[in-house]
Image (spheres, rainbow, N blue to C red):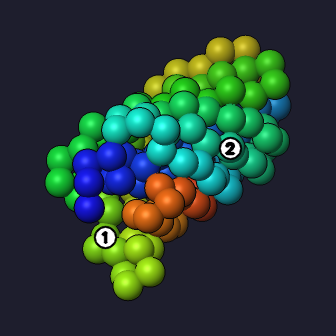
Amino acid sequence: MSRSSWSAVAGAALLAATLLVSTAGARSKSFHFTEAVSGAQISATQAVFKVHDSRAGDGAGVQTVTLHGLSGTDTDTTYYLGASASSHGFFTIGSPDAHGIAKLTGHGRDTGGTGKLQGFVSTYRYTGTFNVKTLVFTVTISGVGSTA
């Protein structure tokens, strides 16, 4: 598999950035959130994605990935109505099956936000798949966030 193919998988990691959005509108100190993310690789080191966050609603984002074999790191920015979120994470890509589908897993934390996401912090984990033939990924994120 090419380096650019693995970058797409990392795109799933950018989903983590969307987790930050999950705190949008939250008044409580601590809360659980989920996200559904799908995206695609657009270059050897970048991906774009759409996300639906259980608290913030729909959004979109950009992810920059650094690969180290079948694992790597990602830095993401996710945009929502009236807010943006930044995150950083780590991911691992499994070996693809005969159809080119590889398991994608990872974890990370939100590192900042603007608008209604200022003061938000979270940690999250995700699982999903990456298609090494089409460079499309889907991920489900689950995390815990809090407001400052």
Q: Amino acid at mark 2?
A: Lys
Closer to us: 50 or 89: 50
Closer to us: 54 or 49: 49
Q: Whole-percent x and y of residue 82? A: 80, 19
Q: Is residue 33 left or right of residue 58?
A: left
Circle 1 sits in a helix, a strand or a loop, which is it?
Answer: loop
Q: Whole-percent x and y of residue 55? A: 78, 43
Q: Amino acid at mark 1?
A: Gly
Q: Whole-percent x and y of residue 106? A: 39, 56
Q: Most extreme residue toward the bottom, as rendered?
A: 98
Number of labelled discs? 2
* Residue 28 location, quadrant: top right
What residue does disc 1 label? Answer: 94
Q: Is residue 50 left or right of residue 85?
A: right
Q: Residue at x 27, y 37 (%)?
A: 66
Is residue 7 placed above or below 43 in the rendered structure? below
What residue does disc 2 label? Answer: 50
